[in-house]
Image (cartoon, coloured by chain):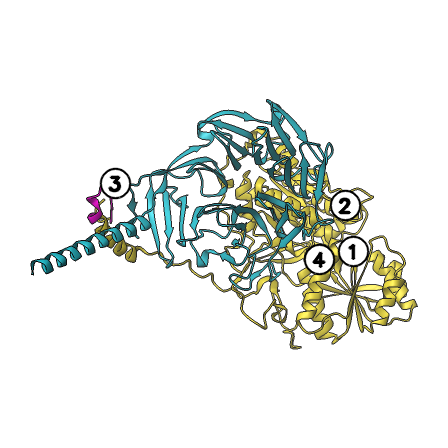
Chain colours: A cyan, B yellow
Amino acid sequence: MERASAASHGRKILWAVGILILATGMAAAQNPSFYTKWTNYTSANGFPPGEVYCVTVDGNRVWAGTGHGLVLLENGRVQKVFTTKDGLAGSAVMSVAVDQLTGDVWIGTFGGLSRYSGGQFKNYTNLTSGLANDLVYGVAVQGQYLWVATTAGVNRLDTHTGSWSIFNESNAPFEEPWTYGISVGAEKIYFAVWGGGVLSYDRANHYWKPYTDPDGEMELVLYRNQGLIHNIVSSVSWNPDTKTFWASTYFGLSSYDGRNWHNYLTKDSGLPSNFINAVKSRGNQVWACTQKGLSEFNPTTNTWVTYRPDLKTGRGEILITRPDGSKRQIASSSTLAHNYILNLDFQGDDLWVATANGLSHGTRQPRKVAAIPR
Amino acid sequence: MKGRNVVFLNIRNGFAILIFALACILVTSARSQSTASTPAKPAPTAIPYANMPPAAVPFGRYRKPYQDWFVDSSTLEYYGAARERPDGDLAALKTINIGFLGPLDANNYDSPYGIAMLHGSQMAVDDANAHGGYHGKPFALKVHDDLPLWGASSMAIVNMVYDDRDWVMLGSVDSSSTHIELRATLKLELPIMDTATNDPTVTQTRIPWLMHNFPDDRQQGYALADYIFNQRHLKRVGILQVNNRYGRAGKDVFFETARRIGHQPLVEVWYAPDTTDFSAQLETLKSSGIDGLVIWGDAAQAGLVLKQMRAMGMRQPVFGSSRICYPEVLKIAGPAAEGLVTISAIDPTRTDPAWQQFRQRFLARFHTEPDAYAAYAYDGMNIAIAAIKKAGLNRGTIMDALRQYEMTRYTGVSGTAFFDYTLNNIAPVTFAEVHNGQFVYWPEQRTDWHGKPVSFLR
């Protein structure tokens, strides 16, 4: 009897421990740590006013492209604002890429391409180089090559020889030459093409492959996971961990893992807006820069978390959308500089976010959060 | 924290696991009470996108799309920061600058349209200044030539924002240039009044910074298809298009509409913009057995085509896009133009005072009749100036003022426009037919695609 009782007691303990572990797991799954500490750099504290179009992290340095030049931050402090007076090709800075081998900083502006090296700017324009157009939206480094996304096609600059190549509708399957963004993968390079979908370039075999909206119509999406959701693609991000590319459009979000497409709209996901300026993905994280906030999507758990100032009150809020579609809203004592998000980059686990009204630095915090009742 | 489901958690504390489990229950309970509803469905609109004929809806016979765009007021929603920018300092400004981008160089194929557009814009600016400008400060047009070399004018909008410091811009004719400006303005946030582009895709981007009042290729294509197949009952149509973006975009709309309603064109051929001998194209069309020809191109080439096809014995009726409706086609084709039916972006024979006064003033000042490009530029510039006057010197609120035209009418010298949720003018177009050597105009009378006339948007 005693043995039976002891065995029964042991089973109860095991059940209790099991339930506790399960409860802990559930709690942890439902309450992941959030980005609740935000430091904002705006005109209120000396940052250039207005939009921050792009942000690129390089170690402890952060480069931010604004409508009034290029900002360099080191260890979280503004070190210098470079303008056309310093030699920058244009005031509106759309993209920045750092060559990790040389330390050169490549800057795409509305005014041409700039290289910042050794404290000096060298500029490349349509008239002075092989640059296809002076409206430069994207730059990316691939070994010795610099890829440039312009409004008149894609350039590749061989930085060793100085020779330029141009790719547009005359030598590659561009439906339109208007190129927005670039993402470099180990095997392929992906391009976001306005009106032309996504293009990939095979690095080894030198061929191009287009991914376009299969329904071919601007005014509709025929099937939910039909393929690319729309041809107006604002950015693309290759995730080497999941071997998937993500494409942001002004008509929703798309992903392709080489076999299946998945599309996301506000009506079937936690996206706060279908108007998405940029996307970046790593590991299980997909970050969508929308005009109604910054969203993190975890495709494994099918959970969305959106950070933004409340669109009416401006107070910080975190919106969670679970796989069943249920939503939860959490107050946050600090928040992003603006809800209109243009770009972001990672610094370890930290985020640097370009918004319509300044740059934001987000840090995950052990939480102490309050759920806002509805 | 009274009455709130406040939960403080500390996972690091092992003992708190039990509290944590309890919290899960509480959170779940709270969630069930606080679950947000999914966004409300947009109210159905009474007007299909672009006033599209039911028979021409893509995939309309097969399935309802998973998502329809451009059919509700969220189409151009804007949550950026433009409205939060400081207003312009009126006291520090000598002029209230407005940008202009259009093809002006005489060597540019499109310069006749660009010059007319500039003249219409200048008249509107001068009219506004004659009425006091903006709080006593004159409006000033900052003119940029849209160069024929592709992409060469791409920096124009950058200069308008950083150098000219314009509050709004007007332009251009070429749809590639307009697309470039459109994408740049998504970043730079300068409102665009587009008064001349035919390309329907410029208003299919969800970018809220552009308003478009010229009848685009969709409106022209739908009207022509309805007229040709439902009212003239032709069945075997051929297409002849100029090989540039204007010709390609326009042809595509007409071709797709015709195909969807069961009258796929038998043949489509193209010609280079400087073509004078069309015998090769006409031989192809003749041998195809067409019973009608649609030309998407310009007046001079259409005149030559008419002359040469009649000389070859081809008697098929000919239809054309709005750029063909110019006196030049009559002059070149002569009697061969008889019976030609085209879309016209305006009816220049209207007798209403607004048009007549504009026509007379334009004629007196520029010594030429105003065309559609002049009329729509005049109206577009008036809309832009009114937006500045209403909203003040803030590009964000000027954009808001333009957006207030969504789903409303505007009557100007070009006629009455109706702007849909994309801020595109989808009002009925005008037809013109050559009769006794002159164009005779009548308003589009679309059918229900079963032969019965319907009234819409008038």
3 or 4: mark nearer the eye: 3
Of helix, strand and loop, which one carries label 1?
loop
Report the residue marked by disc 2.
B115
Q: Rate crowding at label 1 as few (under 14), some (14 to 19) or many (20 or more) other CA atoms within 10 Å.
A: some
Q: Earlier in the sequence, mark 3 or mark 4?
A: 3
Spatial separation of the CA atoms under disc 4 and disc 1: 10 Å
- Pinpoint the chain carrying mark 2: B
Task: Name the N-terminal-most of marks 4 and 2.
Answer: 2
- Kind of residue at badge 4: Ala
Image quadrant where one finds the N terminus of chain B: top left
| Residue B247 drawn in magenta | no
Which residue is labeled 3 in the image? B12
* Upstream in sequence: badge 1 or badge 2: 2
Residue in the image at 27% along x and 55% along y:
B28
Residue position for label 4: B249
Query: Do marks 3 and 4 share a chain?
Result: yes
**Element carrying mark 4:** helix
Instruction: Identify residue type, mark 1.
Output: Asn
Quadrant of the image occupied by residue B338: bottom right
As measured in the structure, the alpha-carbon distance from the residue carrying label 4 to the one carrying label 2 is 23 Å
- Distance from disc 2 to disc 3, alpha carbons, whole Å, reads 74 Å
Determine which residue is flagged by label 1.
B243
Which range is magenta? B5-19
Q: Nearer the viewer, residue B442 or A372?
A: A372
Task: Check disc 2 and report its element: helix, strand or loop.
Answer: helix
